[in-house]
Amino acid sequence: DSGVTQTPKHLITATGQRVTLRCSPRSGDLSVYWYQQSLDQGLQFLIQYYNGEERAKGNILERFSAQQFPDLHSELNLSSLELGDSALYFCASSVGLATGELFFGEGSRLTVL
Amino acid sequence: AQTVTQSQPEMSVQEAETVTLSCTYDTSENNYYLFWYKQPPSRQMILVIRQEAYKQQNATENRFSVNFQKAAKSFSLKISDSQLGDTAMYFCAFMKHSGGGADGLTFGKGTHLIIQP
């Protein structure tokens, strides 16, 4: 158990819909990262937050947004969903910035029908 | 931008054998971290081993060791005395070290390692 909690574990929805994925980092970790894992794109870095502020952005679509709350949990919002958004979405946390070790949650499996 | 290349999509070895997974990367950075992560069928990403680029000594964690060749930008993982539980996808990953932030991990495409009984 990494200490990172993601909900929901599985989610099935329809095209055009909006979903929210939630992540609780390990106790004491200030950084939260979001990754998308799909068969064709592999593991892609989406976005990073540190202590409530956005610190780095990767291949995140404009239809996607995220935030980190004062209690350090984070949410990834996916809107206007398309079939291609079906993927495993991972949250990871670390103590600080660029500390080199990320702890991953079990992921949220999103299926868009 | 950084790239990470794993040239072996799949490997299969017998239990107790030693296996080496290859990874090369491309970067203009001088300070960075390299990692190997394991993703078993449970899909959880588990850190196997980590190497800081400024350290010349190769990292070792029990049966897992790396061969880090900075000039060649190569970072291979050696698993000794392989066990059935080592069956998983293995991802090589890069993270640049910058005091002001990070771009997250850049992952390779992965190597599916199968340990045969």
Image: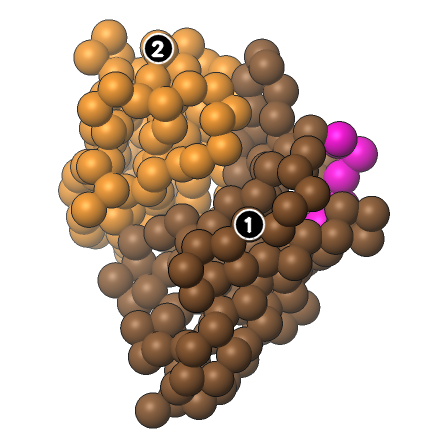
Chain colours: A orange, B brown
The overriding secondary structure of the stretch rendered in magenta is loop
- Mark 2, mark 1: which one is toward the viewer? 1
Q: Quadrant of residue B83?
A: bottom left
Say which amino acid is labelled 2. Gly
Chain for numbered disc 1: B
Q: In the drawing, what numbered circle is on residue A52?
A: 2
Please state, as top left, top right, bottom left or bottom right, where the C terminus of chain B lies in the image: bottom left
Left or right of residue A62, residue A86 in this image = left
Q: Residue at x 44, y 35 (%)?
A: A101
Q: Is residue A74 above or below residue A41?
A: above
Q: Is residue A96 above or below residue A102?
A: above
- Between A13 and A95, the residue placed more toward the observer is A95
Q: Are marks 2 and 1 in contact (CB under 8 Å)?
A: no
The number of callouts visible is: 2
For mark 1, what is the residue? B59
Left or right of residue A49, residue A57 in this image = right
**Can the viewer see residue A61 in this picture?**
no
Give the residues drawn in magenta, as a range: B25-30
Say which amino acid is labelled 1. Ala
Q: Secondary structure at mark 1?
A: loop
- Between B34 and A31, the residue placed more toward the observer is B34
| Residue B84 image offset from top left, x and y in percent | 32, 79
Q: Residue at x 60, y 37 (%)?
A: B52
- Between B64 and B7, the residue placed more toward the observer is B64
**Can the viewer see residue B51 in this picture?**
yes
| Residue A55 image offset from top left, x and y in percent | 50, 16
Question: Dot 2 surroundings within 10 Å: few (below 14), some, or many (20 or more)?
Answer: some
